[in-house]
Amino acid sequence: MKKLIFIVFTLIVSAGLLSACSQALVKSEITDKGSSPASDSAQSKAMEISPFPRTIIDAGGNEVTIDKEPNRIAILHTNYLEYFFALGTAPVASAGASVGTAQQALETYETLLPYKGKAQVMDLGSAREINVEAVLEAQPDVIITFAGHGGLDEIYDQLTQIAPVILLDFNETWQNQTRACAAIVGKEDVAEQIIKDTEAAISSAHKVISAQDKTIALFRTNGGTAFMGRGNKRYYDTFGITAPTGYTFDYAAYSLEAMAEMNPDYIIFQDYIKMSEGFTATQEASSVWNNLNAVKNENVIYFDDSLNTFGPLAMRLTAEKLEQIFK
């Protein structure tokens, strides 16, 4: 009897092992070949186990294959620093922006201050003059920038000899750019959580701001005497901001007299803070400036220039700052 039980038990275990091996083989075939008559759910499970290699069609229409999850990412513009820090995959190298270097961004951008000192990021210099030798020295697994990056066409082929190059769509929503970055590093689930949390912060701010009967004019400076509009209609609607009468959403330049006609309840400068403070200091001798509602009520506010990336960290921080104004 004991012998019979042992034989039956052996057969059951053997059948289980064969079944497991069969399932593993199916998953392996799905992953390796990239296609299978198996169901979509089976393919999804296989992707969870081994999401690489994967092929991405980038914003330039290029078909780019990534063989394995990239650990060494080089970006050619600071705009994408926050995306990869938020995703938990800090770049190993980054170029700067139109002004400044990546190192300056890491040390001064309010959006990036929580990550200061937590990662070593090699500085690739100016985004306007991409240093191919520096990119090569960084030994990246993948190189990332945006379609239309000035000067990229001349060195694109050289960069592809170093690592796969992926172009992102700078004009896409921050949600879709977050998803695009996540697809490169296989962190789609992290991206969706980032989007969910950021949208919740925006929704909270919208509720508070839209309930106020106050107008806000958002500006940057231009190094001269004009107030430069900052933020389009979609941006204002996103946060529930009411613009003053006369404010357009085409990044126009406004004189001090035009400001007097708008007479907003709040003036927010979203630019380099010292530059903005210097700009307003030049207005202080003017009675027109001093009679503005925002000035009289001490409602001239300065936001850091890093919020102009309009990325996930910038949008969340903007939401928190705007909500705080009215609390």
Image (tube, rainbow, N blue to C red):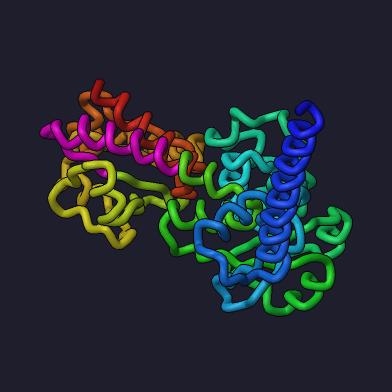
Q: Nearer the viewer, residue 17 or 223?
A: 17
**How many numbered circles does the render carry?**
0
Q: Quadrant of the C terminus?
A: top left
Does the segment drawn in magenta span residue 324? Answer: no
Q: Quadrant of residue 294?
A: top left
Magenta range is 195-217
Q: Nearer the viewer, residue 279 or 271?
A: 271
Q: Quadrant of the N terminus?
A: top right
Q: Residue at x 59, y 47 (%)?
A: 187
Q: Residue at x 48, y 48 (%)?
A: 311
On the question of residue 163 being in view, the answer is: yes
Q: Residue at x 34, y 50 (%)?
A: 227
- Hey, which residue is sitting farthest top in the picture? 327
Q: Main secondary structure of the magenta part?
A: helix
Q: Residue at x 23, y 40 (%)?
A: 216
* Residue 270: image location, x then y, percent: 41, 42
Q: Nearer the viewer, residue 295 or 243?
A: 243
* Residue 190: image location, x then y, percent: 54, 42
Does the segment drawn in magenta span residue 203? Answer: yes
* Residue 247: image location, x then y, percent: 21, 53
Q: Nearer the viewer, residue 29 or 277?
A: 29
Q: Is residue 253 left or right of residue 20?
A: left
Q: Is residue 26 above or below residue 1?
A: below
Q: Is residue 56 above or below residue 193?
A: below
